[in-house]
Image: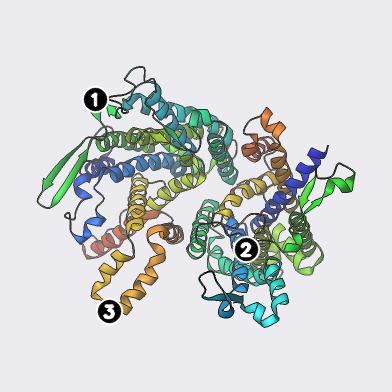
Amino acid sequence: MLGLDKKDTSTFLLVVALVVFAPFLLNPFPDGSELAQFNAGYPDLMQRFLIFGIFAIGFNILFGLTGYLSFGHAAFLGVGSYAGVWMMKLLTMNVVPAIIMSVIFAGLFSLLVGYISLRRSGIYFSILTLAFAQMSFSLAYSVLTPITNGETGLQLNLDDPRVLGVSQVGGSIPAANFFGLAMRDSYELVLGNWLFTFNAGYYLCAVVMIAAFYVSVRIFRSPFGMMLRAVKSNQNRMNFTGLNSRPYTLAAFVISGMYAGLAGGLMVAMDPLAGAERMQWTASGEVVLMTILGGAGTLIGPVLGAGFIKYCENIFSKINDNILYQWFSALPDAVADFLVFIIHPFIGKGWHLTLGIMFMLIVIFLPGGIMEGISRIGKLFSRKKAEQGPNGTAAPAPAE
Amino acid sequence: MDAIFLQILNGLDKGSAYALIALGLTLIFGTLGVVNFAHGALFMIGAFCAVTLQRILTLSFETIDPERLDFLGNPLKVKTPYVESWFGPEMGAAIIDWSVPLAILFSIPIMALVGLMMERGLIKHFYKRPHADQILVTFGLAIVLQEIIKYFYGANPIPTPAPAAFAGSFDFGAMLGFDPNVIIYPYWRIVYFLFSAAIIGGVFAFLQFTTFGMVVRAGMADRQTVGLLGIDIDRRFTIMFALAAVVAGLAGVMYAPINSPNYHMGMDFLVLSFVVVVVGGMGSLPGAVLAGFVLGILESFASMAQVVALFPGINQIVIYLVAIIILLTRPRGLMGRKGVMES
C-alpha cells in the first residue's frame, strides 16, 4: 500500500491507528478514580507527544541512518518557532503559512550549519553542531533581541499588523486557526465515567505527524536511505569507490533540520510563543535521549521514545509525597515512611534524576533502545514456539 | 595599553579553569580513549567539596547566654561552631576562614575515590563501544550527578568566600607605572592562576620525569606493546583517570570563591571545555592548556566595550566562532596529533 511493502504497511497502519485513537487509548482510567492521574489523554500532552515524535523522527533520519551525532538540533526547532511566530505576527493567524515558513527557515539554517559542520565527522561534528547551536542560543538572548524579544520570549501582540487577517478580535488576540477551525477547539465525549477530548490542534498534529512518518519510512526504504546507511557502516570505503558522500549526508542533515523546524512550527501553532531556551543544548540533548531510548535507526523507535519521555516527565513530576502515602496506605506506617523516603528523590522536581538513571541503564544494557528490548522479548517467544512447532525453523530475523 | 593588559589578566583566571578541565579531559581521552562528558560534573563536585567542608566546619551547637538579652528580653541563643570550642575562638575562626584552601586537602581523596568508582564501575565497560555510546552514557552520568547534588544542596548558588586575607585587590597598574586604580585585580584570582599553573606544571612534570609517567606516555603511544612487555597498563590508566578527576576537582574547589557553586556550573563549563579540547587538538596535552588560556583571554578581549560596540554580541559567541574557524582551517586543532579520532 502506498508504495510500502507488507511489513512497513502494517507498521504504518499501527502508527495511524495509535495516533487516531490516542484520545481513547491514553485515557484508560475513569475520571475521579485514583488511577486517573496516570491518564495522558488531554490535548496539551498528546500534542507534545506528536510534536516531539516528529522532532525525533527527523533526528533519527540523521543519527539513525548516517551515524552523525548532532548536538545542536534544538537550534533548528528554535529557528522554526521564531519563524512561525513572526508569520502569525505579520501575516495571519492561520497556522499553515506559519508551519510552512518554519520548515523553510529551519531548512535554510540547517543547510548553512550542515554545509560547514559536515566537513568533519565523529566528535568534531558533534562539537561543531553544538557550537552553532550555542551561538544561536546566545545571540537569540542578546543581540537578536529585536527579532527574538530576548529573555521574555517572542509573543503575539494586539497591535501586530497581521496583513492578511485581523489584528484583534474584540480587544483580544485572535486564536490560531486552520482555515477557521480554532486550534484550541475540542469536542468532548462523555461515556459513563470517562471523558474523552478530541482536540482540533491534536488532530492537525496527527495528520502532519502521520505524513512525516510516512516520508521517513519512504526515506528508510529508498536507495537514498541505503546510501546513508552505507555512510554509517563505512564512509571511507564509499569514498574509495569514487562516490562523494557529502551531498547525501548534507541532504539528510537538511531533511532532519526541516523536521525539527516542522516540530517548532507545530509548537507555535498550538501555543503561539517562542523562547530562546528551546535552542539550548540541553534541549538538543533531550531529542538525542528520545531517539536512543526508543531505538536509533528503527522506524517507530523514536516516536515511542518521545512519547515515553514526555509521559514520564509529566507523570513523575506530578507525583508527590501525599500521593505516595495514599498508595502505601495499606502498609504499616514505618514501612510507608521508609518507602516514601526512598522514592522521594526520584519524583516531583527530581524527575531528571530518574531520567538520567533510565538513560544510563538503556545505553549500558540495551544500546538498541526500547525496540531492541521488544525484539529480544519477541525472539524469546518465537524460539519457544519454534521448539514446540513441527518444523523447528530458526527464529526469524529481528524486526526493525 | 593598560586596557589590553587588564583584559589579559581577566582572561587568565577563566582560562586557567578551562585549561585545567581540558587537561583532565585530554588525559582521559589520550589514555583510555574515552570521551568523558561527565568531566564537567567532576569540576562541579570539586566546587561542592569546598561547600561541604565549609558546612562541616561551621557546624554549631547552641548555648543560651543568660547575660545577653535579645530585643524581646529573652536570653540570647549563641551559636558556636564546634571547631571554635575545640581549638579556641581565634584558631577556630581562622580555620573556618581558610575553609576553601583546606578543602583542597579534603577534596583530593574524595575526587580520587569518585574517579576510581567511575572508571571501575562504568567507563571500564565502554572501552570497546563506539564513541557515540561513550558520549551518551557519560552524558547520562553527568545528569545523574548534577541531580544528586541538586537534591542535597538545592538549586541556588551557594556563596563560598575566600579567606579574608585574599579579599582585596592588587593594584597592578601602580606596580608597572600606570595610573593607580586602573589595573586592579582581585588577589584570589592571582592565587587561582598561580595554583592552576602549579597543577599544570605538576601534571606535566609527573608525566615527564617519573617512571610511572613514562609508562603512561608509552601506553598512550602504543598500548598493546606496553601490555606485551608485561606492564599492567590498565591499572595505570585507571590511576590516570583518578588523577584527571582530582585535577578537575581541584579546579572546582578553587573556583568556588570566584563563582558561587550551583548544580549546573559543570555543564556550563563542560561545553566550553570540549570546545577548548577540540581547538587545542584532541589528545594533545600542551594543546589543551594553550587553547584554554588563548580562548579565556580571547573571551575577555571580546567583552571589552569597544569591541562589543564594533561587533555586537561578539562576547557571547567568540569561543564558538574561533572553534568553528579553527576546525575548518586546521582540522586537527592547534596541536593535534595525526590519527586521533579520525576513524
- Kind of residue at badge 1: Gly
Residue at the image position 67 percent from the left and 68 percent from the top? B103
Gap in Å between the C-alphas at discs 1 and 3? 57 Å
Q: Where is residue A272 in the image (x, y as percent from the top left)?
A: 36, 33
Specify the quadrant that holds the N terminus of chain B.
Answer: top right
Indicate the quadrant where residue A265 lies: top left
Above or below A355: residue A120: above
Identify residue for label 1: A180
Q: Position of residue A372 (x, y in %)?
A: 37, 55
Q: Do the residues labelled 2 and 3 touch (CB within 8 Å)?
A: no
| Circle 3 crowding by C-alpha within 10 Å: few under 14, some 14–19, many from 20 | few
Mark 3: secondary structure: loop
Q: Earlier in the sequence, mark 1 or mark 3?
A: 1
- Kind of residue at badge 2: Gly
Q: State the residue in front, B214 or B111.
A: B111
Identify residue for label 3: A332
Report the colour scheme. Answer: rainbow
**Numbered badge on residue B6:** none
Gap in Å between the C-alphas at discs 2 and 3? 41 Å
- Kind of residue at badge 3: Pro
Residue at the image position 34 percent from the left and 32 percent from the top? A269
Identify residue for label 2: B46
Above or below B97: residue B80: below
Check the residue under mark 2 and report the chain it is in.
Answer: B
Q: State the residue in front, B17 or B124.
A: B17
Mark 1 on the same chain as mark 3: yes
- On screen, residue A36 versus residue A77, left or right, reads left
Check the residue under mark 1 and report the chain it is in.
Answer: A
Mark 1: secondary structure: loop
